[in-house]
């Protein structure tokens, strides 16, 4: 029943809607200030910055993974950074999230990547448990810093 495919420009409205659902889940809707036009330009424009895998359960849109490539100077290899993984509540527990993670890992390995990384909110214990079952672990000793560049 699980079907995964790369996003195409016709998926833009669905991707933007899923990002909104994720923002609501994380109680961060007030920080969602980008537009669907920004998203279109950055995913499907002349210089794409990120990619998306769409996840379907049967014919229903179940979730997505948005990612981009990074680089490790110590490994001298590219990496994959998972910016967002979201599965709609009705489809959780069916293997959609695991399928999305496995597909990203497959892509990372096929490109010779040395790392597959992401961040998780410290209060999201169900996600932390899920990622541990996937074989991931926290990167203890490192603190993520951020400087927001837009108002």
Image (spheres, grey):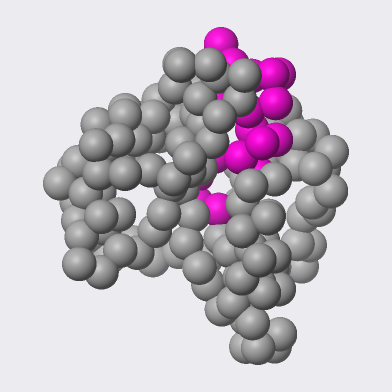
- Count the numbered circles shown: 0
- Which residue does the image show at 81% across and 53% down from the upper left? 137
Who is closer to the viewer here, 1 or 73?
1
- Which residue does the image show at 79% across and 34% down from the upper left? 129
Residue 138 vs residue 12: left or right? right
Question: Considering the image in quadrants, where does the N terminus appear?
Answer: top right
- Which residue does the image show at 44% across and 22% down from the upper left? 61
Residue 60 vs residue 111: left or right? left
**Residue 98 magenta-highlighted:** yes
Query: What segment carries the magenta color?
Result: 82-101
Which residue lies most toward the top here? 90
**Residue 111 locus on image (x, y percent):** 61, 70
Give the answer, above or below, for where 34 lies relative to 45.
above
- Which residue does the image show at 56% across and 60% down from the upper left? 81
Who is closer to the viewer here, 100 or 36?
100
**Residue 146 magenta-highlighted:** no
Question: Considering the image in quadrants, where does the C terminus appear?
Answer: bottom left
Q: Quadrant of residue 57?
A: top right
Give the answer, above or below, for where 88 lies relative to 10.
above
Who is closer to the viewer here, 13 or 136?
13
Give the answer, above or below, for where 137 lies relative to 85.
below
Residue 129 vs residue 51: left or right? right
Residue 24 at least partly seen: no
**Residue 6 locus on image (x, y percent):** 44, 45
Residue 114 vs residue 58: left or right? right
**Residue 10 locus on image (x, y percent):** 24, 37
Q: Quadrant of residue 42?
A: bottom left
Q: Quadrant of residue 130?
A: top right
Residue 75 at least partly seen: yes
**Residue 13 locus on image (x, y percent):** 24, 31
């Amino acid at each position: 029943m699980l079907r995964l495919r790369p996003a195409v420009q016709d998926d833009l409205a669905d991707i933007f809607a899923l990002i909104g659902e994720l923002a609501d889940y994380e109680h961060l809707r007030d920080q969602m200030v980008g537009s669907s036009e920004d998203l279109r330009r950055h995913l499907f424009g002349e210089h794409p910055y990120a990619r998306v895998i769409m996840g379907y359960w049967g014919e229903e849109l179940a979730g997505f993974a948005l990612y981009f490539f990074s680089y490790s100077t110590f490994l001298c290899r590219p990496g994959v950074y998972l910016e967002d993984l979201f599965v709609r509540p009705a489809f959780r527990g069916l293997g959609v999230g695991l399928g999305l993670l496995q597909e990203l890992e497959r892509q990372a390995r096929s490109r010779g990547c040395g790392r597959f990384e992401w961040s998780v909110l410290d209060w999201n214990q169900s996600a932390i448990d899920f990622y541990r079952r996937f074989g991931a672990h926290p990167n203890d000793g490192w603190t993520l810093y951020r400087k927001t560049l837009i108002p």
